[in-house]
Amino acid sequence: MATLEIKDLHVSVDTEDGPKEILKGVDLTIKDGETHAIMGPNGSGKSTLAYSIAGHPKYTVTQGSVTLDGVDVLAMSVDERARAGLFLAMQYPVEVPGVSVANFLRTAKTAIDGEAPKLRTWVKDVNTAMEQVKMDPAMSQRSVNEGFSGGEKKRHEIVQLELLDPKVAVLDETDSGLDIDALKIVSDGVNRFKEDGDKGVLLITHYTRILRYITPDFVHVFVDGRMVEEGGPELAEQLEAEGYDKYVKSAV
Amino acid sequence: MTVATDSVRNALEQSPEKVVSHLHPEGSFEIADHVVPTGREEVWRFTPLKRLRGIHQDAPLDGHSFTVEVHAADGVTAEAVGVDHESRGTSGIVPPDRVSARAWAAADSVFLVDVPKEHVGEEATTVTLTGTGNDVASAGHLVIRAGAFAKATVVIRFQGTATLAENVEIVVGDGAELTVVSLQDWDDDAVHHSTQHARIGRDATLRHVAVSFGGDVVRHDATAEYAGPGGSVEMLGMYFADEGQHIEHRLFVDHNQPHTRSNVNYKGALQGQGAHAVWIGNVLIRKEAEGIETYEENRNLVLTDGCQADSVPNLEIETGEIEGAGHASATGRFDDNQLFYLRSRGIEESEARRLVVHGFFNDLIRKIGVPELEEQLVGTVEAELEKNVHRITGATAPVEVP
Ligand SMILES: Nc1ncnc2c1ncn2[C@@H]1O[C@H](COP(=O)(O)OP(=O)(O)OP(=O)(O)O)[C@@H](O)[C@H]1O
Ligand SMILES: [Mg+2]
């Protein structure tokens, strides 16, 4: 059971010339088992939306609300949001030198569950999750994301998605920078996550390619800080053929 | 002035290549050749002289306020010998400053750790010096010597409290592999001034490690030079400067022989009001030092407001025929993106900071390569973080990314 509800969300960032509004009133409701795709041109504010949901300190919410099953998400700290069941797969996963993947995953799992995972099953779970995305389990001894290729970083995000098992996953351009094989591997991971049927997915992407492997229930077109159109999977086909031009023009 | 003529004469008497480097003033055994520092001198400008308890002036150095406990590895001798022992002075040390010259004159014995030639041992020799009081200053002289093709590890641990001025000589025989760890685990009110000089034999390797956690003022000045081509030195250091602490590491690698290598890597964390860390990394590549390789790096992690980290790398190159030379220095606060990433996985802020600090030191601790120490150093980092956990979380609560 999980419903993520975003209402009239306005978000700004601090710039040298004062605050700049990036999100200009976003409305979106993701119910149980629904997959929503958000598509939009570069710089339209897709990552801003993702980071704002996760609580990145760079972004200031100036108006609106975000709730998870009716509970105010904006009042929570970053880690509280994660423990409440939100997960953000990042467009640019961060390197943390000196902290091993194994240590990181165990610490995160312990934090999310409120207790340490059982050692024996945990090691197996980690290995399985890594093998499923074709990551060498030996990589768990390396520092988090350090020296990982772009594709390895994205697969590592999916490993975390599988192990931490959130209620709602926000995937910010998890498909970008992947070759076709890696794209299938990552999509399979997301589909396994969706299998339970009660998970929400917000899939942010620039390209329609990933939507051939992960079928969205809804597609939203995002331009200049707001949703400008909503439809079913067929909207993605149309975007593929026509691009964002007509939306970008009408937004100006 | 005799000072000037003496040093000119010395310079002329030595081989013509031995030019005086502007990185390092010419030393002297004569106390009178070293005027009392005022704090304006380049080599003293970072040091809080007032807190040195007069060891840089004329305070007597005749205290013997410490006990020494030795655990010598099989085949290694570690014992006090007379000041006239043949080993003294064999590193080529010439006191570079007044404290060192005074300690040289005041020492009434030499502690010698002697590793016979071709002796190979895994077990570390540990010398623990426990200070028993700091109102009278003490002088010390330590010689660590590894014979040709020997392989050994020597750990010198300082604890308790003292006002200590010491000279340390490290002599690495041809083809030998020596690890020397100086662990400053002092109480908060110790003053420790240490002048270290290492001579690295042909094809020999020295791993020199400084770990500084305790003490009110800790000032270490370590020089490495080579007795033949093919030598290699790795100088590793980690420090944790707390509230009011001054921790200063001055390093000088003198590439005076061809095909020698040096790698300097120091990492420090600072926390609390008035915590001050100083790192000076001087590397001189002399004209004859062709085909050498050198890299030096210092990183500081500033955990709270009110700290100061000074980090000064200097590379002086007199020949163009080198394999590689580089340096890096960086001082920064917590990386907000790292903290965000960890926290977005449910990890609480304080725990995320702990992970980042441990991560910062981990690769260095592994490089030190002394298994007996590894766990202990991780534990010390943990204990340092414990001390300041409130301050750390408090100081940067609203994290703003520009
Ligand atoms: N500190 C800042 N100062 C000024 N503008 C900023 C700042 N941070 C972000 N922006 C702007 O906010 C807008 C939205 O950025 P965001 O990263 O959310 O876009 P995006 O839709 O994810 O783009 P992409 O497809 O390239 O990932 C961009 O125009 C960006 O330049
Ligand atoms: Mg983006």
Image (tube, coloured by chain):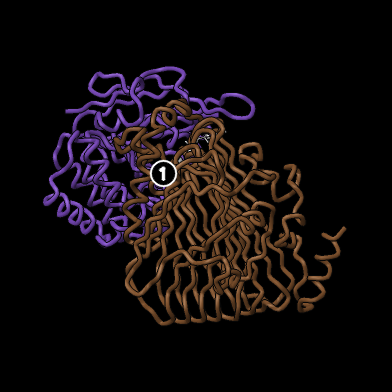
Chain colours: A purple, B brown
Please identify the quarter of the rendering in which residue B178 is found. Answer: bottom left
Neighbour tally class for label 1: few under 14, some 14-19, many 20 plus, Cα within 10 Å: many
Choose between B246 and A43: the one closer to the eye.
B246
Choose between A136 and A15: the one closer to the eye.
A136
Residue B188 visible to an observer of this rendering: yes
Disc tally is: 1
Q: Position of residue B119 (x, y in %)?
A: 38, 79
What residue lies at 26% left-to-right and 56% top-to-bottom? Answer: A185
Q: Position of residue B336 (x, y in %)?
A: 46, 37
Under circle 1, the secondary element is helix
What residue lies at 40% left-to-right and 39% top-to-bottom? Answer: B384
Q: Position of residue B182 (x, y in %)?
A: 47, 56
What residue lies at 71% left-to-right and 72% top-to-bottom? Answer: B286
In the picture of the structure, the residue carrying the numbered disc 1 is B357
Side of B29 relative to A111 (left or right) = right
Residue B330 visible to an observer of this rendering: no
The amino acid type found where label 1 is placed reads Val
- Is B37 situated above or below A219? below
Is ligand 1 closer than 8 angstroms to the Cβ of mark 1?
Answer: no
Q: Position of residue B350 (x, y in %)?
A: 36, 33
Side of A156 relative to B214 (left or right) = left
Chain letter, disc 1 residue: B
Choose between B11 and B230: the one closer to the eye.
B11
